[in-house]
């Protein structure tokens, strides 16, 4: 396997300092559930001039094979589909830039004001920032070729080479826990202060940690798509400043 430094040119592209108007979303196939189609339409409605790129599992593998062939054997070796989906979204950012949102996000208003003067961005899901799952990878935004994604992929490679991939914990290997470690690594390098992390009320709204918080059960029950009390209209009223909100439908779709 090539070393990390042999694989990447670690210099940023100085000509791309604005996040391109691209929305990326992905699913196994193009056959979406009705509720996914409903939320998908909100991105098109609120961003009519943006490019919308929808990726299937096949599209993801083709991207890796075409643009990042050095990673293909690793990609194919990941034992879980969610791990491959995690990796693919990092390569969307590296290759194209733009914004990635999981399919259980609803767009509430245009993103342009949120992304003004931003080069690369993530979002906290939780106000409990020290929690290892407080920084999901369900939302990503970036200029193309940003160096931060090199750090992210470096951590995926480290986990792969260290055998962590076999533990089956996507959060730790390719997902939120890995991402938080990459953020810490990037920020400690003090390369620049160009990584923006939005507070939870701007992007995620709903915190999946509320499922274990009795004081938030009433909110979580109407905001969690698999819950029989789910009510998106009521849920949105709790987050007046949000540009997007997630309903965490993974219990339905991935379960």
Image (spheres, rainbow, N blue to C red):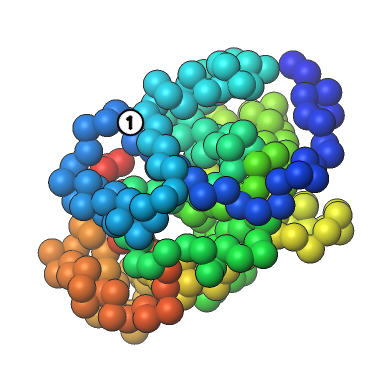
Farthest left residue in view: 228
x, y percent for residue 202? 48, 72
Badge 1 marks a residue whose secondary structure is: loop
Pick the quarter of the image with the C terminus: top left
The answer to whether residue 248 is visible is no
x, y percent for residue 40? 29, 49
x, y percent for residue 254? 30, 41
Q: Residue at x 46, y 35 (%)?
A: 85
Pick the quarter of the image with the N terminus: top right
Farthest right residue in view: 190
Q: Is residue 133 above or below residue 160?
A: below
Residue situated in front as seen by the camera: 102 or 18: 18
Label 1: few (<14), some (14–19) or many (≥20) C-alpha neighbours in 10 Å: some
Q: Is residue 98 above or below residue 134?
A: above
Q: Residue at x 24, y 48 (%)?
A: 36
Q: Is residue 20 above or below residue 10?
A: below
Residue situated in front as seen by the camera: 72 or 63: 63
Q: Which residue is mark 1?
A: 28
Farthest front residue in view: 49
123 sits left or right of 35 in the view: right
Q: Residue at x 52, y 75 (%)?
A: 127
Instruction: Give the total of numbered labels.
Output: 1
35 sits left or right of 237 in the view: left
Residue situated in front as seen by the camera: 105 or 177: 105
102 sits left or right of 12 in the view: left
The answer to whether residue 242 is visible is yes
Q: Which of the 4 quarters of the picture holds residue 117?
A: bottom right
């Amino acid at each position: 396997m090539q070393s990390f430094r042999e694989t990447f040119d670690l210099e940023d592209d100085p000509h791309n300092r604005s996040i391109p108007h691209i929305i990326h979303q992905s699913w196994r196939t193009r056959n979406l559930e009705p509720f996914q189609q409903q939320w998908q339409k909100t991105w098109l409605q609120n961003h009519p001039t943006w490019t919308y790129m929808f990726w299937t599992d096949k599209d993801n593998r083709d991207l890796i094979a075409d643009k990042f062939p050095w990673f293909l054997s690793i990609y194919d070796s990941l034992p879980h589909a969610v791990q491959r989906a995690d990796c693919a979204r990092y390569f969307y950012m590296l290759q194209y830039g733009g914004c990635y949102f999981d399919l259980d996000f609803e767009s509430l208003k245009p993103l342009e004001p949120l992304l003004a003067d931003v080069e690369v961005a993530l979002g906290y899901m939780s106000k409990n920032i020290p929690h290892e799952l407080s920084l999901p990878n369900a939302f990503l935004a970036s200029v193309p070729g940003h160096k931060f994604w090199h750090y992210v992929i470096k951590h995926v490679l480290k986990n792969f080479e260290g055998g962590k991939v076999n533990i089956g914990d996507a959060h730790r290997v390719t997902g939120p826990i890995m991402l938080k470690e990459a953020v810490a690594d990037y920020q400690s390098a003090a390369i620049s202060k160009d990584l923006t992390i939005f507070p939870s009320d701007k992007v995620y709204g709903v915190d999946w940690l509320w499922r274990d918080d009795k004081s938030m059960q009433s909110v979580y029950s109407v905001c969690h798509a698999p819950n029989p009390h789910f009510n998106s209209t009521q849920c949105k009223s709790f987050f007046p400043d949000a540009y997007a909100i997630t309903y965490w439908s993974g219990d339905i779709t991935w379960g």
